[in-house]
Image (cartoon, rainbow, N blue to C red):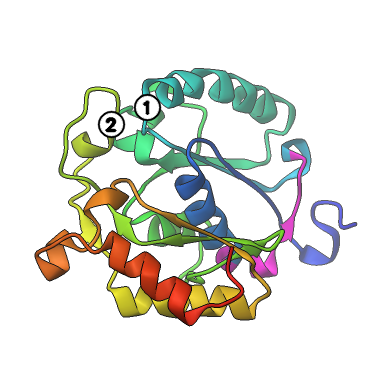
Amino acid sequence: YFERGVFGVKSIYFFATGCDKHRDEFERMMLSISDHYVKTTNPFKADFVIQSFCAISKECIESIATTMAFLKIVKQENPGCKIFVGGCADSIVDLKKLYPFVDGTFERVERIKQILTLLGESKEKEIPPVRVVNRRAIISISKGCNRHCSFCKVGYLDMTFKSVPMEEVLSRVHQAMKNRARFIVLEGENTTEYGLDLYKEKKLLELLKEILRTEKNIR
């Protein structure tokens, strides 16, 4: 176990709240960034604390205040750490204005570049498209939504609906299976309209049939 500052190694604590999609995307991104940091589960011992907030529902927005109250305590007891917050919620809530103790904020769309800048890094990182945890992989098949449902904030976050090409989805599923995944979760803010933007018709059923045809051991 490395304490902060030993051998010049910096420690990093990162966490995401909200939906599975948001947490998976953020954790894949952070794992690509944190390869030369020591990952810690204790923010009071971290050099960098990075918190990403989801904004898909009213409950997610309301939970921000509780988490930020905790991070304020972290900052008071660990004043040397740098706290960066952001994610989808930064498009709705001015986190820096509401919580001036934070050292920087990042948006959802450009967050990997912005987080690297906040960390003082200039080299770009490539986010791994698939992460397998407990033989389960979450595969994104679309992003955004053009609907404006009253119970969901996605349609108000300037997230235009965009499907991932079918061949790319199949490639990610195959990669996950090679990495010993047995459970595949296809996710997106609006999966029912998958393919409508690319193929001018809904393709979710066809995608599912093709996955089952090409991957025999899937569940």
- Residue drawn where x is 30% and y is 58% of the image: 142
Name which quarter of the figure residue 60 lies in. top left
> Horizontally, is 173 left or right of 45 in the view?
left
Kindly identify which residue carries mark 2: 153
- CA distance for labels 2 and 1: 6 Å
> Horizontally, is 146 left or right of 185 in the view?
left
Count residues near mark 1 (Cα–Cα under 10 Å), then give few for <14, some for 14-19, many for 20+. Answer: some
x then y, percent, for residue 125: 48, 73
Q: Is residue 5 above or below residue 60?
A: below
Q: Nearer the viewer, residue 142 or 119?
A: 142
x then y, percent, for residue 149: 21, 29
Count residues near mark 2 (Cα–Cα under 10 Å), then give few for <14, some for 14-19, many for 20+. Answer: many
Does 6 lie within the magenta span? no
- Residue drawn where x is 52% and y is 78% of the image: 215
**Can the viewer see residue 123?**
no
x then y, percent, for residue 46: 72, 45
**Sequence order check: which comes first, mark 2 or mark 1?**
1
Quarter of the rendering occupied by the C terminus:
bottom right
Q: Which residues are magenta?
A: 32-42
> Horizontally, is 125 left or right of 183 in the view?
left
Name which quarter of the figure residue 184 lies in. bottom right
Query: Which residue is outermost to the right?
Result: 1
- Residue drawn where x is 76% and y is 49% of the image: 40
x then y, percent, for residue 136: 63, 60
Q: Nearer the viewer, residue 50 or 172?
A: 172
Q: Secondary structure at mark 1?
A: loop
Q: Are marks 2 and 1 in contact (CB under 8 Å)?
A: yes
Q: Name the residue type under label 1.
A: Ser
Kindly identify which residue carries mark 1: 57
**Can the viewer see residue 150?**
yes
